[in-house]
Amino acid sequence: MTQKPKPLHSIKVDGPIPAHLARSIIEETLRAAILDGRLPCGTALRQQDLADLFGVSRMPVREALRQLEAQGLLSVTAHKGAVVAPLIQGDAGETYELRILLETEALRQSIPLLTAADHAQAAVCIEQLANQHDYTEIGRLNRLFHMALYGKAPNRRLLRLVEDGLNEEERFLRFNLEAMGLGNLSQDDHRAMLQAAMARDVEGSVALLVKHLNRGVEVITRYLASPAAQSRKAAR
Ligand code: NI
C-alpha cells in the first residue's frame, strides 16, 4: 500500500506564533502554499490539524480560513469542511462567458473616466509583460493591465466580481501557462485595447476585449482536454 501524501508536511512553522499575529500568519502561510501548489486543489484542511501545526487555538485558524474562502482559494462545505478550491471553478466556458459580461461592462463604465495616469499604468504593464518570462509575474501583470483599464468603473461591486475572476485566472495561469506553451499572453490584443481606450472608443475596445477573452477560453479549453493537462491532473 502506498502512503497517502500529507500536503501539510510541506508547511514549515518557525517557532511559537504571537497570539495577536496568529490569524495573519496562518492566512499568509496557507495562501502561499495554495498558490505555489504545495497544497493542491482538493486538499481538505482540518481546523484541528492546522491548530496543532501552528501551535494555536482553533479560533485564529477559523478566521484565517474564512479570509481564504472570501478570496476564492478555499471552498467550505458543511460536509467536508475547508477544501482547497479547484483552479477553474466548474466549466471553463461558463466561467469565461460570465467574465465577458462583467469585464465588458466594467470597461464600458471605466473608459470615459480613465486618466492619463491610468493609460500610463496600463502601458507599463504591457512593457513589463514583453520582457517577462516568469509565469507568476506574467499572471500578475496581466491582471494589473486589465484592472488599469477597468479600475475607474464607478460600480465597486462589479469591480470586485471582475477582480475575483482575474484572480482565478491568474492562479490557473501560474500552474498551467508553462504547460500550455503560451508565454506571450496576447500582447497585440493588450496594445490594441489600450489604444482604443485612449481614443475613448468604447465599443471598439469592448469588441477587442471580447476577442481577447474568447481567445483565452479557446486556449484553456483545448489545453484542459489535452493529454498533458489530464496527466497533470492525475499527478495531483
Ligand atoms: Ni489579458
Image (cartoon, rainbow, N blue to C red):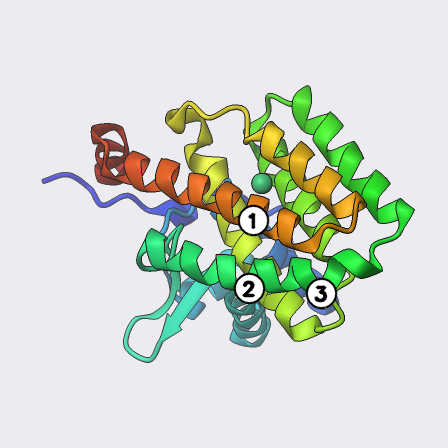
Q: Which residue is mark 2?
A: 102
Give the residue type at disc 3: Gln
- The image shows a total of numbered marks equal to 3
Please state, as top left, top right, bottom left or bottom right, where the C terminus lies in the image: top left
Which element is circle 2 on?
helix
Q: Please state which amino acid type lies under the numbered disc 2.
A: Leu
Pick whichever of labels 1 and 3 is earlier in the sequence. Answer: 3
Where's residue 214, x and y in %? 43, 45
User: Percent from the top left, x then y, of residue 112?
Assistant: 80, 59
Give the label, 2 or 1, closer to the camera: 1
Task: Tell me the residue that label 1 is attached to.
Answer: 207
Q: Residue at x 83, y 48 (%)?
A: 118
Q: Quadrant for ligand 1?
A: top right
- Residue 38 appearing in the image: no
Q: Is residue 79 visible?
A: yes
Whole-percent x, y for residue 100 in the image: 50, 57
Q: Which of 197/159 is in front?
A: 197
Q: Residues within 10 Å of mark 2 (few under 14, many from 20)?
A: some
- In three-dimensional space, the C-alpha distance between marks 2 and 1, rounded to whole angstroms, equals 14 Å
Residue at horizontal 38%, vertical 36%? 219
* Pick the front one: 82 or 213: 213
User: Given the current orientation, which residue lies at the most extreme left position?
Assistant: 1
Q: Residue furthest right?
A: 116
Badge 3, how many Cα within 10 Å: few under 14, some, many 20+?
some
